Amino acid sequence: MAFKGLSRRQFAGLTGRSIPGISALSAGSSQPEDSVPKRGTSSGFPNGFLWGTATSSYQIEGAVNEDGRGPSIWDRFAHTRGTISDHSNADTATDHYHLYKQDVQLMKALGAKAYRFSIAWPRVFPEGAGTPNPKGLDFYNRLLDELSANGIEPFATLYHWDLPQALQDRFGGWTSRDASKAFADYAAYVAKHLSDRVKHFFTINECSRLVHLGHGIGADAPGLKLSPSGQNQVRHNVALGHGLAVQAVRAHGRAGTRVGPAENAVSCIPAIETPANIRAAEIATRELNAGYLTVMLEGKYTDAYLAQAGKDAPKYTAEDLSVISSPIDFVGLNVYMPDHYVIAADNERGFTLAPFPASFPHMKAAWLRPGPETMYWVPRHVAKLWNVKSIYITENGTSGTDQPAPDGTIYDLDRIMYLRNYLTQLQRATSEGVPVIGYFLWGLMDNFEWSDGYEQRFGLYHVDFHTRRRTPKLSASFYRETIARNAVA
Ligand code: GBH
Protein backbone atom coordinates (compact mmCIF):
# COMPACT_ATOMS: atom_id res chain seq x y z
CA MET A 1 0.00 0.00 0.00
CA ALA A 2 0.94 3.60 -0.24
CA PHE A 3 2.46 3.46 3.23
CA LYS A 4 5.40 1.40 2.06
CA GLY A 5 8.80 2.89 2.50
CA LEU A 6 7.31 5.68 4.50
CA SER A 7 7.46 6.10 7.99
CA ARG A 8 8.43 2.92 9.74
CA ARG A 9 12.05 2.91 8.89
CA GLN A 10 12.39 6.62 8.88
CA PHE A 11 10.57 7.05 12.14
CA ALA A 12 12.66 4.27 13.64
CA GLY A 13 15.82 5.84 12.35
CA LEU A 14 14.89 9.22 13.68
CA THR A 15 14.13 7.96 17.13
CA GLY A 16 17.04 5.56 17.26
CA ARG A 17 14.76 2.62 17.87
CA SER A 18 13.65 -0.26 15.81
CA ILE A 19 9.96 -0.02 15.25
CA PRO A 20 8.38 -3.09 13.78
CA GLY A 21 5.06 -1.78 12.51
CA ILE A 22 2.88 1.19 12.05
CA SER A 23 0.71 0.37 15.01
CA ALA A 24 3.74 0.42 17.25
CA LEU A 25 4.23 4.05 16.32
CA SER A 26 1.23 5.16 18.28
CA ALA A 27 1.59 6.94 21.56
CA GLY A 28 2.04 3.92 23.73
CA SER A 29 5.28 2.88 22.11
CA SER A 30 7.05 6.03 22.96
CA GLN A 31 7.85 6.10 26.64
CA PRO A 32 9.89 8.93 28.03
CA GLU A 33 13.56 8.16 28.31
CA ASP A 34 15.05 8.39 31.77
CA SER A 35 16.92 11.50 30.79
CA VAL A 36 13.78 13.26 29.60
CA PRO A 37 11.97 14.99 32.43
CA LYS A 38 8.68 13.27 33.10
CA ARG A 39 5.98 15.84 32.91
CA GLY A 40 3.21 15.54 35.39
CA THR A 41 0.40 18.00 35.88
CA SER A 42 2.63 20.43 37.68
CA SER A 43 5.25 20.88 34.99
CA GLY A 44 3.39 19.72 31.88
CA PHE A 45 -0.04 20.17 30.40
CA PRO A 46 -3.29 19.60 32.29
CA ASN A 47 -4.91 16.20 32.55
CA GLY A 48 -6.95 15.37 29.50
CA PHE A 49 -5.24 18.00 27.33
CA LEU A 50 -6.08 17.11 23.75
CA TRP A 51 -3.37 16.87 21.10
CA GLY A 52 -4.32 16.90 17.45
CA THR A 53 -3.56 18.01 13.94
CA ALA A 54 -5.57 20.11 11.53
CA THR A 55 -6.41 20.33 7.81
CA SER A 56 -9.09 21.84 5.60
CA SER A 57 -11.16 20.35 2.81
CA TYR A 58 -10.10 22.33 -0.25
CA GLN A 59 -6.45 22.22 0.76
CA ILE A 60 -6.22 18.42 0.88
CA GLU A 61 -9.19 16.57 -0.62
CA GLY A 62 -8.88 16.90 -4.39
CA ALA A 63 -11.59 14.91 -6.19
CA VAL A 64 -13.29 18.17 -7.03
CA ASN A 65 -15.57 16.58 -9.60
CA GLU A 66 -16.36 13.36 -7.80
CA ASP A 67 -19.56 12.03 -6.32
CA GLY A 68 -21.61 15.04 -7.24
CA ARG A 69 -19.50 17.79 -5.61
CA GLY A 70 -20.36 21.21 -6.97
CA PRO A 71 -17.76 23.88 -7.72
CA SER A 72 -16.62 26.23 -4.97
CA ILE A 73 -15.38 29.79 -5.23
CA TRP A 74 -11.88 28.43 -4.70
CA ASP A 75 -12.14 26.17 -7.77
CA ARG A 76 -13.14 29.18 -9.80
CA PHE A 77 -10.50 31.42 -8.25
CA ALA A 78 -7.62 28.93 -8.59
CA HIS A 79 -8.51 28.38 -12.23
CA THR A 80 -8.37 32.09 -12.91
CA ARG A 81 -5.08 33.18 -14.45
CA GLY A 82 -2.69 35.02 -12.15
CA THR A 83 -4.25 34.15 -8.80
CA ILE A 84 -1.97 31.34 -7.59
CA SER A 85 1.77 31.96 -7.44
CA ASP A 86 2.79 28.60 -8.93
CA HIS A 87 -0.21 28.46 -11.29
CA SER A 88 -1.51 25.38 -9.51
CA ASN A 89 -4.96 24.48 -8.23
CA ALA A 90 -6.34 21.92 -5.82
CA ASP A 91 -8.06 19.63 -8.32
CA THR A 92 -6.05 16.76 -6.84
CA ALA A 93 -4.20 18.39 -3.92
CA THR A 94 -3.03 15.59 -1.60
CA ASP A 95 -5.78 13.28 -2.90
CA HIS A 96 -6.99 12.84 0.65
CA TYR A 97 -10.45 12.02 -0.71
CA HIS A 98 -9.02 8.68 -1.80
CA LEU A 99 -6.13 8.34 0.65
CA TYR A 100 -8.00 9.25 3.84
CA LYS A 101 -7.42 5.83 5.43
CA GLN A 102 -3.70 6.23 5.05
CA ASP A 103 -3.95 9.76 6.43
CA VAL A 104 -5.73 8.54 9.54
CA GLN A 105 -2.77 6.21 10.06
CA LEU A 106 -0.46 9.22 9.84
CA MET A 107 -2.37 10.77 12.73
CA LYS A 108 -2.31 7.57 14.67
CA ALA A 109 1.43 7.25 14.19
CA LEU A 110 1.80 10.59 15.98
CA GLY A 111 -0.28 9.43 18.89
CA ALA A 112 -2.68 12.29 18.20
CA LYS A 113 -6.10 11.74 19.70
CA ALA A 114 -7.97 14.50 17.90
CA TYR A 115 -8.30 15.71 14.33
CA ARG A 116 -9.68 19.00 13.07
CA PHE A 117 -10.86 18.86 9.47
CA SER A 118 -13.37 20.84 7.46
CA ILE A 119 -16.44 19.79 5.58
CA ALA A 120 -16.76 20.94 1.98
CA TRP A 121 -20.12 22.69 1.73
CA PRO A 122 -20.25 22.09 -2.07
CA ARG A 123 -19.99 18.34 -1.51
CA VAL A 124 -23.01 18.40 0.75
CA PHE A 125 -25.03 21.01 -1.18
CA PRO A 126 -23.59 21.19 -4.72
CA GLU A 127 -25.81 24.19 -5.44
CA GLY A 128 -25.17 25.69 -2.03
CA ALA A 129 -28.76 25.20 -0.94
CA GLY A 130 -31.78 23.13 -1.85
CA THR A 131 -31.22 19.45 -2.58
CA PRO A 132 -28.48 17.78 -0.53
CA ASN A 133 -26.08 15.32 -2.12
CA PRO A 134 -25.94 12.20 0.07
CA LYS A 135 -22.84 10.92 -1.72
CA GLY A 136 -20.98 14.04 -0.63
CA LEU A 137 -21.88 13.51 2.99
CA ASP A 138 -20.91 9.86 2.67
CA PHE A 139 -17.26 10.81 2.33
CA TYR A 140 -17.39 12.31 5.80
CA ASN A 141 -19.24 9.27 7.09
CA ARG A 142 -16.38 7.11 5.85
CA LEU A 143 -13.80 9.43 7.36
CA LEU A 144 -15.61 9.53 10.71
CA ASP A 145 -15.85 5.76 10.83
CA GLU A 146 -12.15 5.48 10.12
CA LEU A 147 -11.27 8.03 12.80
CA SER A 148 -13.48 6.28 15.31
CA ALA A 149 -11.94 2.89 14.52
CA ASN A 150 -8.56 4.42 15.31
CA GLY A 151 -9.52 6.20 18.49
CA ILE A 152 -9.28 9.72 17.07
CA GLU A 153 -11.88 12.30 18.03
CA PRO A 154 -13.25 14.41 15.16
CA PHE A 155 -13.55 18.22 15.35
CA ALA A 156 -15.34 19.49 12.25
CA THR A 157 -15.08 22.99 10.80
CA LEU A 158 -18.20 23.86 8.84
CA TYR A 159 -16.63 26.51 6.65
CA HIS A 160 -12.99 26.83 5.65
CA TRP A 161 -13.58 29.21 2.73
CA ASP A 162 -14.93 26.85 0.03
CA LEU A 163 -18.26 28.58 -0.59
CA PRO A 164 -20.39 26.91 -3.27
CA GLN A 165 -19.85 28.92 -6.45
CA ALA A 166 -23.60 28.78 -7.09
CA LEU A 167 -24.17 31.10 -4.12
CA GLN A 168 -21.56 33.55 -5.38
CA ASP A 169 -23.34 33.59 -8.72
CA ARG A 170 -26.86 33.73 -7.31
CA PHE A 171 -26.57 36.57 -4.80
CA GLY A 172 -22.92 37.59 -4.50
CA GLY A 173 -21.93 35.16 -1.75
CA TRP A 174 -21.07 36.83 1.54
CA THR A 175 -21.91 40.28 0.20
CA SER A 176 -25.50 39.20 0.87
CA ARG A 177 -27.03 38.04 4.12
CA ASP A 178 -28.62 35.29 2.06
CA ALA A 179 -25.23 33.59 2.43
CA SER A 180 -25.54 33.76 6.23
CA LYS A 181 -28.94 32.06 6.01
CA ALA A 182 -27.80 29.42 3.52
CA PHE A 183 -24.84 28.70 5.80
CA ALA A 184 -27.22 28.09 8.70
CA ASP A 185 -29.30 25.66 6.62
CA TYR A 186 -26.19 23.76 5.63
CA ALA A 187 -24.96 23.76 9.24
CA ALA A 188 -28.31 22.40 10.40
CA TYR A 189 -28.15 19.57 7.87
CA VAL A 190 -24.58 18.63 8.80
CA ALA A 191 -25.32 18.76 12.53
CA LYS A 192 -28.37 16.58 12.07
CA HIS A 193 -26.50 13.94 10.12
CA LEU A 194 -23.07 13.94 11.75
CA SER A 195 -23.59 14.86 15.40
CA ASP A 196 -23.96 11.21 16.32
CA ARG A 197 -20.16 11.13 15.96
CA VAL A 198 -19.00 14.74 15.80
CA LYS A 199 -19.34 16.33 19.23
CA HIS A 200 -17.46 19.54 18.40
CA PHE A 201 -18.15 21.88 15.51
CA PHE A 202 -16.30 25.02 14.54
CA THR A 203 -18.41 27.46 12.54
CA ILE A 204 -16.19 29.59 10.29
CA ASN A 205 -12.42 29.44 9.99
CA GLU A 206 -10.79 32.84 10.30
CA CYS A 207 -13.57 35.28 9.51
CA SER A 208 -11.00 38.04 9.26
CA ARG A 209 -9.02 36.47 6.46
CA LEU A 210 -12.16 35.62 4.57
CA VAL A 211 -13.22 39.26 4.79
CA HIS A 212 -9.90 40.99 4.26
CA LEU A 213 -8.16 38.75 1.74
CA GLY A 214 -11.30 37.53 -0.03
CA HIS A 215 -13.24 40.80 -0.21
CA GLY A 216 -10.71 43.54 0.60
CA ILE A 217 -7.46 42.95 -1.24
CA GLY A 218 -8.70 40.18 -3.51
CA ALA A 219 -5.84 37.77 -2.76
CA ASP A 220 -8.21 34.94 -1.80
CA ALA A 221 -11.45 33.75 -3.40
CA PRO A 222 -13.74 35.27 -4.48
CA GLY A 223 -11.06 37.86 -5.33
CA LEU A 224 -13.14 40.96 -4.63
CA LYS A 225 -11.81 44.41 -3.77
CA LEU A 226 -14.79 46.02 -2.15
CA SER A 227 -15.10 49.52 -0.77
CA PRO A 228 -14.82 49.99 3.00
CA SER A 229 -18.60 49.90 3.35
CA GLY A 230 -18.78 46.75 1.24
CA GLN A 231 -16.13 45.08 3.39
CA ASN A 232 -17.87 46.14 6.59
CA GLN A 233 -21.10 44.60 5.34
CA VAL A 234 -19.35 41.35 4.41
CA ARG A 235 -17.78 41.29 7.88
CA HIS A 236 -21.20 41.67 9.43
CA ASN A 237 -22.78 39.02 7.19
CA VAL A 238 -20.00 36.58 8.05
CA ALA A 239 -20.44 37.22 11.79
CA LEU A 240 -24.17 36.75 11.34
CA GLY A 241 -23.50 33.48 9.52
CA HIS A 242 -21.44 32.35 12.51
CA GLY A 243 -24.27 33.17 14.92
CA LEU A 244 -26.96 31.55 12.81
CA ALA A 245 -24.82 28.43 12.47
CA VAL A 246 -24.34 28.28 16.24
CA GLN A 247 -28.11 28.31 16.62
CA ALA A 248 -28.57 25.73 13.85
CA VAL A 249 -26.09 23.33 15.43
CA ARG A 250 -27.89 23.68 18.77
CA ALA A 251 -31.29 23.15 17.20
CA HIS A 252 -30.36 20.18 15.02
CA GLY A 253 -27.42 18.51 16.73
CA ARG A 254 -27.81 15.87 19.38
CA ALA A 255 -27.77 16.89 23.01
CA GLY A 256 -24.23 17.69 24.09
CA THR A 257 -23.02 18.88 20.68
CA ARG A 258 -20.61 21.75 21.22
CA VAL A 259 -19.95 24.65 18.91
CA GLY A 260 -17.71 27.72 18.66
CA PRO A 261 -15.68 29.82 16.21
CA ALA A 262 -12.11 29.27 14.96
CA GLU A 263 -10.64 32.75 14.73
CA ASN A 264 -7.22 34.11 14.00
CA ALA A 265 -7.66 36.91 16.47
CA VAL A 266 -5.53 39.96 15.79
CA SER A 267 -2.80 39.28 18.31
CA CYS A 268 -1.65 42.10 20.58
CA ILE A 269 1.43 41.47 22.67
CA PRO A 270 2.72 43.75 25.42
CA ALA A 271 6.04 44.96 24.01
CA ILE A 272 7.45 44.78 27.54
CA GLU A 273 5.48 42.95 30.18
CA THR A 274 4.53 45.81 32.47
CA PRO A 275 1.04 46.04 34.00
CA ALA A 276 0.30 49.14 31.90
CA ASN A 277 1.38 47.51 28.64
CA ILE A 278 -0.54 44.34 29.47
CA ARG A 279 -3.69 46.37 30.04
CA ALA A 280 -3.04 48.30 26.81
CA ALA A 281 -2.65 45.02 24.92
CA GLU A 282 -6.01 43.86 26.29
CA ILE A 283 -7.68 47.07 25.14
CA ALA A 284 -6.05 46.72 21.74
CA THR A 285 -7.21 43.10 21.48
CA ARG A 286 -10.79 44.14 22.11
CA GLU A 287 -10.69 47.02 19.63
CA LEU A 288 -8.76 45.35 16.83
CA ASN A 289 -11.09 42.34 16.89
CA ALA A 290 -14.25 44.46 17.11
CA GLY A 291 -15.90 42.99 14.02
CA TYR A 292 -15.07 39.41 15.01
CA LEU A 293 -14.54 37.97 18.50
CA THR A 294 -15.63 41.16 20.25
CA VAL A 295 -19.05 41.31 18.62
CA MET A 296 -19.45 37.53 18.93
CA LEU A 297 -18.74 37.65 22.66
CA GLU A 298 -20.25 41.02 23.60
CA GLY A 299 -23.16 41.33 21.18
CA LYS A 300 -22.25 44.83 20.16
CA TYR A 301 -19.83 46.72 17.99
CA THR A 302 -17.49 48.90 20.02
CA ASP A 303 -18.01 52.67 19.91
CA ALA A 304 -14.58 53.12 18.38
CA TYR A 305 -15.35 50.60 15.63
CA LEU A 306 -18.59 52.35 14.69
CA ALA A 307 -17.02 55.80 14.95
CA GLN A 308 -14.17 54.76 12.71
CA ALA A 309 -16.51 53.21 10.16
CA GLY A 310 -18.70 56.33 10.17
CA LYS A 311 -21.02 56.34 7.20
CA ASP A 312 -19.49 53.07 6.00
CA ALA A 313 -20.74 51.17 9.07
CA PRO A 314 -22.58 47.93 8.28
CA LYS A 315 -26.36 47.82 8.22
CA TYR A 316 -27.74 45.60 10.94
CA THR A 317 -30.54 45.12 13.40
CA ALA A 318 -30.50 44.61 17.15
CA GLU A 319 -31.73 41.10 16.46
CA ASP A 320 -28.60 40.48 14.32
CA LEU A 321 -26.40 41.35 17.27
CA SER A 322 -28.13 38.93 19.56
CA VAL A 323 -27.82 36.17 16.94
CA ILE A 324 -24.12 36.92 16.43
CA SER A 325 -23.55 36.67 20.18
CA SER A 326 -25.42 33.40 20.63
CA PRO A 327 -23.74 31.55 23.49
CA ILE A 328 -20.83 29.38 22.40
CA ASP A 329 -19.17 26.47 24.16
CA PHE A 330 -15.55 27.35 23.44
CA VAL A 331 -13.37 29.71 21.44
CA GLY A 332 -11.02 28.24 18.84
CA LEU A 333 -7.91 30.31 18.14
CA ASN A 334 -5.53 30.00 15.21
CA VAL A 335 -2.24 31.32 16.57
CA TYR A 336 0.68 31.91 14.23
CA MET A 337 2.37 35.19 14.94
CA PRO A 338 2.39 38.49 16.77
CA ASP A 339 0.35 41.00 14.77
CA HIS A 340 1.21 43.92 17.05
CA TYR A 341 3.51 44.73 19.94
CA VAL A 342 1.63 47.15 22.13
CA ILE A 343 2.80 49.99 24.33
CA ALA A 344 0.53 51.84 26.77
CA ALA A 345 -0.13 55.42 25.73
CA ASP A 346 -1.82 58.46 27.06
CA ASN A 347 -3.99 58.90 23.98
CA GLU A 348 -7.64 58.36 23.17
CA ARG A 349 -7.22 54.67 22.44
CA GLY A 350 -4.94 53.99 25.37
CA PHE A 351 -2.30 52.22 23.31
CA THR A 352 0.14 52.54 20.46
CA LEU A 353 1.29 49.81 18.12
CA ALA A 354 5.05 49.65 17.83
CA PRO A 355 6.36 49.45 14.26
CA PHE A 356 8.26 46.29 13.38
CA PRO A 357 11.92 46.87 12.63
CA ALA A 358 13.04 45.65 9.22
CA SER A 359 15.35 43.19 10.94
CA PHE A 360 12.52 41.35 12.72
CA PRO A 361 12.92 37.71 11.65
CA HIS A 362 10.43 35.63 9.72
CA MET A 363 9.98 31.97 8.94
CA LYS A 364 9.90 30.75 5.34
CA ALA A 365 6.66 32.62 4.68
CA ALA A 366 7.43 36.34 4.74
CA TRP A 367 4.32 37.07 6.81
CA LEU A 368 5.13 34.52 9.49
CA ARG A 369 7.07 36.40 12.15
CA PRO A 370 7.94 34.07 15.01
CA GLY A 371 6.82 35.43 18.37
CA PRO A 372 6.30 32.44 20.65
CA GLU A 373 4.78 34.59 23.40
CA THR A 374 1.79 35.10 21.08
CA MET A 375 0.75 31.61 22.18
CA TYR A 376 0.61 32.82 25.77
CA TRP A 377 -1.00 36.22 25.30
CA VAL A 378 -3.78 35.51 22.82
CA PRO A 379 -5.57 32.86 24.88
CA ARG A 380 -4.87 34.83 28.06
CA HIS A 381 -6.43 38.02 26.65
CA VAL A 382 -9.43 36.10 25.30
CA ALA A 383 -10.05 34.31 28.59
CA LYS A 384 -9.68 37.51 30.58
CA LEU A 385 -11.55 39.96 28.36
CA TRP A 386 -14.59 37.77 27.82
CA ASN A 387 -14.48 35.30 30.65
CA VAL A 388 -14.10 32.42 28.20
CA LYS A 389 -13.89 29.07 29.99
CA SER A 390 -12.70 26.75 27.22
CA ILE A 391 -10.22 27.48 24.47
CA TYR A 392 -8.82 25.29 21.74
CA ILE A 393 -5.76 26.29 19.76
CA THR A 394 -7.25 25.35 16.41
CA GLU A 395 -4.10 25.99 14.36
CA ASN A 396 -0.42 26.64 14.97
CA GLY A 397 2.56 25.82 12.82
CA THR A 398 4.95 27.09 10.19
CA SER A 399 6.11 26.44 6.68
CA GLY A 400 9.72 25.62 5.91
CA THR A 401 11.97 24.78 3.00
CA ASP A 402 11.70 21.10 3.95
CA GLN A 403 14.28 19.76 1.52
CA PRO A 404 15.37 16.15 2.08
CA ALA A 405 19.00 15.80 3.17
CA PRO A 406 21.26 13.34 1.31
CA ASP A 407 20.13 10.60 3.72
CA GLY A 408 16.53 11.27 2.68
CA THR A 409 15.45 12.79 5.97
CA ILE A 410 13.82 16.19 6.14
CA TYR A 411 15.56 17.86 9.06
CA ASP A 412 13.03 20.64 9.56
CA LEU A 413 14.82 22.12 12.53
CA ASP A 414 13.23 25.51 11.95
CA ARG A 415 9.76 24.01 12.43
CA ILE A 416 10.91 22.17 15.55
CA MET A 417 12.43 25.37 16.93
CA TYR A 418 9.19 27.22 16.25
CA LEU A 419 6.96 24.54 17.77
CA ARG A 420 9.14 24.00 20.82
CA ASN A 421 9.04 27.69 21.67
CA TYR A 422 5.32 28.11 21.03
CA LEU A 423 4.50 25.02 23.08
CA THR A 424 6.62 26.31 25.94
CA GLN A 425 4.51 29.47 25.93
CA LEU A 426 1.33 27.41 25.71
CA GLN A 427 2.46 25.52 28.77
CA ARG A 428 3.12 28.82 30.49
CA ALA A 429 -0.51 29.71 29.79
CA THR A 430 -2.06 26.46 30.99
CA SER A 431 0.14 26.38 34.09
CA GLU A 432 -1.24 29.81 35.02
CA GLY A 433 -4.79 28.56 34.59
CA VAL A 434 -5.56 29.96 31.13
CA PRO A 435 -8.22 27.45 30.08
CA VAL A 436 -6.70 26.01 26.90
CA ILE A 437 -7.89 22.40 26.65
CA GLY A 438 -6.51 21.28 23.31
CA TYR A 439 -4.05 22.05 20.53
CA PHE A 440 -4.27 21.27 16.82
CA LEU A 441 -1.04 21.54 14.90
CA TRP A 442 -1.25 22.93 11.38
CA GLY A 443 -0.84 20.91 9.53
CA LEU A 444 -0.98 17.21 9.36
CA MET A 445 0.64 17.23 5.92
CA ASP A 446 1.75 19.60 3.19
CA ASN A 447 -1.20 20.88 1.20
CA PHE A 448 -2.52 23.44 -1.26
CA GLU A 449 -1.56 26.64 0.49
CA TRP A 450 -4.16 28.95 -1.10
CA SER A 451 -2.59 31.68 -3.26
CA ASP A 452 0.86 30.26 -2.47
CA GLY A 453 -0.10 27.06 -4.27
CA TYR A 454 2.26 24.28 -3.26
CA GLU A 455 5.14 26.63 -2.50
CA GLN A 456 4.58 26.79 1.26
CA ARG A 457 4.75 23.49 3.12
CA PHE A 458 3.21 23.46 6.59
CA GLY A 459 2.97 19.72 7.20
CA LEU A 460 4.46 17.36 9.73
CA TYR A 461 4.40 14.97 6.81
CA HIS A 462 6.02 15.89 3.54
CA VAL A 463 3.85 15.24 0.49
CA ASP A 464 5.39 14.56 -2.90
CA PHE A 465 2.82 16.21 -5.14
CA HIS A 466 3.73 13.97 -8.08
CA THR A 467 3.41 10.62 -6.33
CA ARG A 468 1.25 11.80 -3.38
CA ARG A 469 3.58 9.91 -1.11
CA ARG A 470 3.64 11.07 2.51
CA THR A 471 6.92 11.06 4.43
CA PRO A 472 7.35 12.16 8.05
CA LYS A 473 9.62 15.13 8.62
CA LEU A 474 11.77 15.25 11.73
CA SER A 475 9.08 17.45 13.29
CA ALA A 476 6.66 14.49 13.15
CA SER A 477 8.97 12.72 15.59
CA PHE A 478 9.18 15.87 17.68
CA TYR A 479 5.40 16.09 17.90
CA ARG A 480 5.04 12.40 18.62
CA GLU A 481 7.50 12.69 21.50
CA THR A 482 5.75 15.81 22.78
CA ILE A 483 2.41 14.04 22.83
CA ALA A 484 3.82 10.92 24.43
CA ARG A 485 5.65 12.87 27.10
CA ASN A 486 2.56 14.82 28.00
CA ALA A 487 0.04 12.02 27.82
CA VAL A 488 -1.17 11.78 31.39
CA ALA A 489 -2.85 8.48 32.00
C1 GBH B 1 -4.22 29.75 8.29
O1 GBH B 1 -4.30 31.14 8.30
C2 GBH B 1 -5.32 29.09 7.50
O2 GBH B 1 -6.45 28.85 8.31
C3 GBH B 1 -4.90 27.80 6.84
O3 GBH B 1 -5.86 27.40 5.90
C4 GBH B 1 -3.55 27.97 6.23
O4 GBH B 1 -3.14 26.81 5.56
C5 GBH B 1 -2.59 28.32 7.33
O5 GBH B 1 -2.95 29.52 7.87
C6 GBH B 1 -1.16 28.52 6.87
O6 GBH B 1 -1.05 29.67 6.09
O7 GBH B 1 -0.18 37.43 2.69
O8 GBH B 1 0.60 39.28 4.04
O9 GBH B 1 -1.72 39.15 3.45
C7 GBH B 1 -3.20 31.73 8.97
C8 GBH B 1 -3.38 33.19 9.23
C9 GBH B 1 -3.62 35.32 8.23
C10 GBH B 1 -1.90 33.88 7.50
C11 GBH B 1 -3.46 36.13 6.97
C12 GBH B 1 -1.72 34.66 6.24
C13 GBH B 1 -2.00 36.77 5.20
C14 GBH B 1 -0.73 37.52 5.22
N1 GBH B 1 -3.24 33.95 8.00
N2 GBH B 1 -2.10 36.04 6.46
S1 GBH B 1 -0.50 38.42 3.73
Image: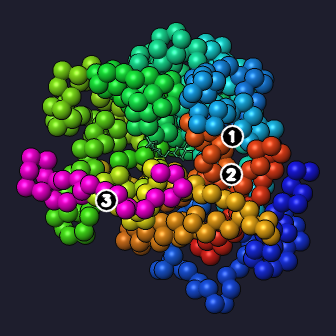
Q: Which residue is mark 1?
A: 60
Q: Mark 3: which amino acid?
A: Pro
Say the numbered circle drawn on residue 357. Answer: 3
Secondary structure at badge 1 equals helix
Over which residues does the magenta segment extend? 342-366
344 falls in the magenta region: yes
Residue at left offset 75%, top offset 34% = 92
Going from N to C along the chain, the mark reached first, 1 or 3, is: 1
Secondary structure at badge 2 equals loop
**Does the residue at mark 1 contact the one at mark 2 (Cβ under 8 Å)?**
yes
> What colour scheme does the image use?
rainbow
Q: Position of residue 269 (x, y in %)?
A: 30, 59
Secondary structure at badge 3 equals loop
Q: CA separation, marks 1 and 2?
A: 9 Å
Q: CA separation, marks 1 and 3?
A: 36 Å
Q: Which residue is mark 2?
A: 445
Q: Can see residue 446?
A: yes
- Seen in the picture, residue 457 relative to 247 is either above or below; the reply is below
- State the predominant SS element of the stretch in magenta: loop
Query: Is 111 displayed left or right of 297 in the figure?
Result: right
Q: Mark 2: which amino acid?
A: Met
Q: Quadrant of residue 211?
A: top left
